[in-house]
Amino acid sequence: METMLGGHLLHGCDYNPEQWLEYPEVFEEDLRLMKAAEINSVTLGVFSWSVLEPEEGVYDFEWLDRIIGRLWEADIQVILATPSGAMPHWLTQKYPEVMQVRADGRRNLPGKRHNFCYTSPIMREKIKELDVRLSEKFGQRDNVILWHISNELGGNFEDSACYCEQCQAAFRQWMKKRYGTLKRLNQAYWGRFWSHSYTDWEQIHSPAPHGEWTVTALEVDWRRFVTEQMSSFCLWEINAVRTYSKLPVTTNFMDFFKGLDYHRLQRILDIVSWDSYPQWHAQKDEAPVAVRASAGHHMMRAMKKQPFLLMESVPSGVNWRMFNPLKRPGMHMLSSMQAIACGSASVQYFQWRKGRGSYEKFHGAVLDHKNGSCTRTFADTARVGRRLKSLTGLVEGTVNRPRVAVIFDWENWWALENTTGPRLDIDYVSCVLAHYAPFWEMGIDVDFVGMDDCVEGYTLVAAPLNYMYKDGYADKIRRFVGEGGIYVTTYFSGMTDESDLCFIGHHPLEDVLGIIQEEIDAPGPEFENSMIFNGISYPVGNLRELIHVSGDTQVLACYTDDYVKGMPALTAHSFGRGTAYYIAAEPDRALLNALYKEAAGKAGLKNPLGIPLPYGVTVSLRTNQDGGGLIFVMNFKNEPAELCGFGQYTDGETGEIYKHQMILEPFSCRILISEETV
């Protein structure tokens, strides 16, 4: 993907004109106000199946043809969606088998979104017929630039999966392909436990609340299968729209969404896009929310190491949380610039105009039910549009190229949180974000990568709660550290293989880590403990490994209390030209800040300004092929922030020169050009 589709940053929205066909004056107003807000792209057709095909085999494209033509005249580009995310009632009435079956065996009733069975031949055939016609009619239109496949795949309100008999049969075939023989399957599943050995492939059934849910490897395999089936369905639609079109394809991801392995799904896409809805102003301290939003952006960019698309955001407030605050002055601009800073080529919204009825009638949009352009939200949106337009030449050809990677792996997530013990409330995402936050606070960009991804080119790799080791992962890390890399991992890592079978004998990276795992303690909160690192005492949480060091491993911190007093809690071990750190106990944020500051220093990492940053301020760096860079300096505090001690930089937008000092306004972002190669 080029930095920008169509040669410019996209500023756009989901647009649903089919909801307003009886109000022709609304479209005319929309067109006029889109130009006023510097909207240059819209996403059409996401939920339009019942209008595009009001009866089986009866198609009505006239309204869409007319709107795409008018948008072309207005120089507005179109991202055209396939409408499989929500099925029309004629389809579910005639073919009830297209609807999902729940884990308890009940078939869903019609309605909602994401209610389709991705295995159903009828569902696949019906959406293919429509997609091919869309491809033929619109796939070569001048202002149609991208296919948007379905919508938030797997985003069902209850579950991502369908448990119907067609899916069960497909699952059995998938298992045959994966394991080959029942003997291999039973060995991988430790099937003799509780007499659960399979003697016939037909005995295999997905996990269910009223059936088998105790075989942990089955749960992981089922989730792998669901991702494969959804990828197959997505590819089915991709092939359909490519019948008459060569346009790139995307589908919108959803942050840390547990239901589907995005590392797998992204392989069939040309461009990664996602929907970002941070809960700004949930508390006075915006930094934790900014950390998670930033992590989502970095994850999406890292999947293809290229610019991504922010497909959905909101310029005001959402409607589906317990508390739904509006964005305070400055936050819409700042959150939009945060996306660009982390590698996005767009800022887009759901949606352009609020609907009059149904579930999302009070979800934030650019246009409210009243007042047209005479609103604070419209003014904020227009300001973002003007700024993006002016930034196009500045960011072209740039993208983030971090030297730090954090391992985030969906299969590890599934296995870790499905295992019984040592605690039942382990939260993988929260742990990963806790390890990411110190880099955000230091202003050091990060890639999120899976265990299957390459780690060459990174200087530091962090692998928190890396419970499962996939085949080849240990060898990959051994080479990384041996060749000079810095590796940080934690308690409850390297416990099982990819079938969720515990390793026996020793830890797969025992030689690299220089430690021997013995036990892991999970006491209640009344059993407090701490560790002392660099003369400072830090409390530890309620997961604490008992480890022993081997060889020349350096003990950096020991437990201070209880029967483990004096035992290692934090270690460092030299291996080859690199160093491996091991955190044996659940750390608090202050300890992680201190440890990663030390590790980053050892790795020669620093932010592009080369200075410590005030809390709530971060920087992100987009570089071009020549090494020059744009430094996005962002203040997520609702008060001014002062930066001191850096060199000389030019403001890329105003031309102002900053020497050694800068005052950032509340909720603001400045974009600097380094006078030297970054």
Image (cartoon, helix red, strand yellow):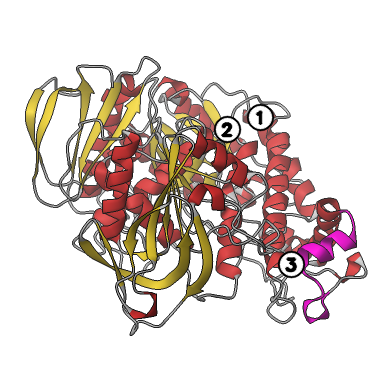
The mark found on residue 65 in the picture is 2
Q: How crowded is mark 2: few (under 14 residues within 10 Å), some or many (20 or more)?
A: some
Mark closest to the chain's N terminus, 2 or 1: 2
Q: Which residue is drawn at 38% across and 31% down?
A: 400
Q: How far apart are marks 3 and 2 (CA)?
A: 38 Å
Residue 12 visible? The answer is yes
Q: Quadrant of the C terminus?
A: top left
Residue at disc 2, secondary structure: helix
- Kind of residue at badge 3: Tyr
Q: Which of marks 2 and 1 is in front?
A: 1
Amino acid type, callout 1: Lys
In the displayed structure image, the side of residue 283 where residue 185 appears, left or right: right
Looking at the image, which residue sits at the far top?
A: 626
Q: Look at mark 3 in the image and give the residue it sits on.
A: 163
Q: How far, Cα to Cα, is label 1 from label 3?
A: 35 Å
Residue at the spot 77% in from the left edge and 46% down from the top edge: 57
Q: Are marks 2 and 1 in contact (CB under 8 Å)?
A: yes
Pointer 1 local density, CA inside 10 Å: few below 14, some 14–19, many at least 20: some
Vertical comparison of 433 with 134: above or below: below
Q: Nearer the viewer, residue 328 or 218?
A: 218
Q: Is residue 527 above or below residue 500?
A: below
| Coordinates of residue 56 in the picture (x, y in percent) | 76, 51
Q: In this view, does 303 lie above or below 394?
A: below
Tag in front: 1 or 3: 3
Magenta range = 180-196
Query: Element at badge 1?
Result: helix
> What amino acid type should be assigned to the residue bearing mark 2?
Asp
Q: Mark 1 points at which residue?
A: 137
